[in-house]
Image (spheres, helix red, strand yellow):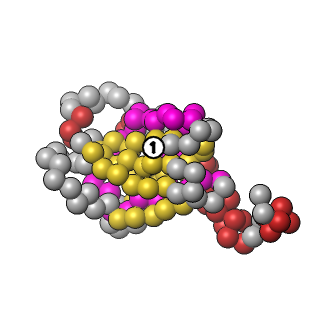
Amino acid sequence: MSSASAAGPSSSETVTRRRFLAALGVGATSATAGCGRFSGTDSSGEGDTIEIIPVNETDRPVTVAIRIEAADGSVLFSRVYELDAGHADESAGIDTRPATIHAFTPDGRSNSWEYDPDTDLQCEGKDVGLWIRETSIDPWYNC
């Protein structure tokens, strides 16, 4: 830890913590409300759902908040994940094509990008994957 970090949080770290806590609140509210959209009652086909797949590529547990927005800015998905070292979570998905993906951790790693799976994958909705690494969060796509 650098001496600047030990002296106290910078304003950018404070903003990141606020964003993290806001996402945590939204995720907790969705979980408490039952989040019926993700209940698994409609299992008509994996190809219809865009899965959200965070993967912890580190050697320690991580917390990551993921927020996905539609083109109009409305929130399609918001969840905070607790992932053990080397583990992934494939338990959630969305049925609407996203526009923007935001992901961040309490320690300051963050990334935002437009949903643009420019790949040769032949499927309806390309799943959104996130590699959570020691110093970054990087996107990937899959069917």
User: Most extreme residue toward the left, as rendered?
Assistant: 122
Residue with the mark numbered 1: 54
Residue 66 point in image, percent of width and height: 49, 51
Q: Which residues are magenta?
A: 79-106
Element under disc 1: strand
User: Most extreme residue toward the bottom, as rendered?
Assistant: 11
Whether residue 22 can be seen here: no
Decide if residue 63 is on the left or right side of residue 74: right
Of residues 32 and 105, the one nearer the viewer is: 105
Of residues 134 and 64, the one nearer the viewer is: 134
Decide if residue 21 is on the left or right side of residue 46: right
Which residue is found at the position 68% from the left and 59% from the top?
A: 17
Q: Amino acid at mark 1?
A: Pro
Of residues 125 and 4, the one nearer the viewer is: 4
Q: Quadrant of residue 29?
A: top right
Decide: few, some or many residues near mark 1? Use Cα within 10 Å; few <14, some 14-19, many ≥20.
many
Residue 47 point in image, percent of width and height: 20, 38
Q: Is residue 137 magenta?
A: no
From the viewer's perspective, is residue 47 above or below residue 125?
above
Of residues 40 and 131, the one nearer the viewer is: 131
Which residue is found at the position 26% from the left and 57% from the top?
A: 117
Which residue is found at the position 69% from the left and 65% from the top?
A: 13
